[in-house]
Amino acid sequence: MLVFTVLAVLFLALAALRLFGVDGNRYTAALLALTPYWTASGMVLGIVALATRHWWIGAGTVAVAVALVAALLPRMVPATEQPPAAGRQLRIMSSNLYLGRADAKAIVDLAREHRVDVLNLLELTPREAGELERAGLFDLLPYRVFQPVSNGVGSGIASRYPLTELNLTGPSVLRQPSARVDLGGVAIEVVAVHVLPPTTSAGTWKSEIAGLPRPGEPVRILAGDFNATLDHATFRGLLDAGYTDAADRTGSGFAPTWPSRGFLPPVTIDHILVDARVTVNAYRVLEVPDSDHHAVYAELTLP
């Protein structure tokens, strides 16, 4: 009885944070990233409690687990309706380069294979920038706003179309370059997002996400490593502001992006957020050799 009670209380406490939209501190934010895992565990706990005639514990735990499942399942279902966008087509990809260790040729090959128009690169180092150039990135995407820095701090944007560097974000520990992309007669704004992890500082994580630009004119796209999942209220605040998660809209909201290797439970912390007026035609998670993140890719139709 005591074991069931302790486990049920822990589960219900976490469930309350998720259901009431409280990210809390560095520890609870980390646990919230694992919501799908402990939701499944809570369901099993409730069923076992019922099977062993711990009726109140079992019934309460199962009921709360069902409420969590109801909150999680929509991200597995593609949107039945999308905005009637009829503008330019755009293909965007974002990749975390794992402190500049990712295979530069593989990045360029993916950009070529998927005919990428805009490529966001996180943890871009000076050495990796040189390797990308030698691999032919700038033959494919000749325009760039690069801020390469060692130790995972740098980031960059490469584009098929002309770029004008902007400053759209608030203060951040890691570089988050932004740019206006001139598509010829129409422009969009893109931010290469790399937010400090909540496990380093939950307060900084929250303030950096709050400092990301809200939707506006022209159309804005935020793509990169948010170090947040759809189970974080801080991240959902961006969706409430008028963005759509490309993975969520296409029913791929559970497709994990990190870690791509190792023993930690994989979670979805890399995202492509688009103005809610944009149509998401396709979304994919792509393997990048020598990186600890998968790349994320979306095909879009602009309004």
Image (spheres, rainbow, N blue to C red):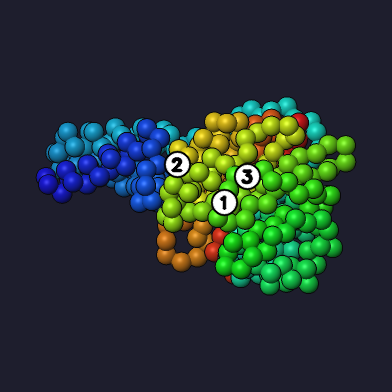
Give the residue type at disc 1: Ser
Q: Position of residue 291 (x, y in %)?
A: 58, 66
Q: Secondary structure at mark 2?
A: loop
* Label 3, label 1: how far apart the Cα atoms are: 8 Å
Q: Residue under label 3, please give it.
A: 169
Q: How many marks?
A: 3
* Direction from residue 252 to residue 24 in the image, left or right: left
Residue type (three-letter) at the residue carrying disc 2: Asp
State whether residue 281 appears in this view. Answer: no
Disc sitting over residue 67 in the figure: none
Under tag 3, what secondary structure? loop
Please state which of the two labelled residues, at mark 3 or mark 2, is closer to the viewer.
Answer: 3
Nearest to N terminus: mark 2 or mark 1 = 1
The mark nearer the N terminus, 3 or 2, is: 3
- The residue lying furthest to the front in this view is 171
| Amino acid beneath label 3 | Thr
What residue lies at 42% left-to-right and 61% top-to-bottom?
264
Question: Residue at (31%, 47%) from the top-left corner?
Answer: 41
Give the labeled residue for mark 1: 172
Q: Nearer the viewer, residue 48 or 21?
A: 21
Residue drawn 74% across the image and 63% down it? 108
- Distance between mark 3 and mark 2 Cα atoms: 23 Å
Q: Which residue corresponds to mark 2? A: 231
Mark 2–mark 1 distance (CA, rounded to whole Å): 22 Å
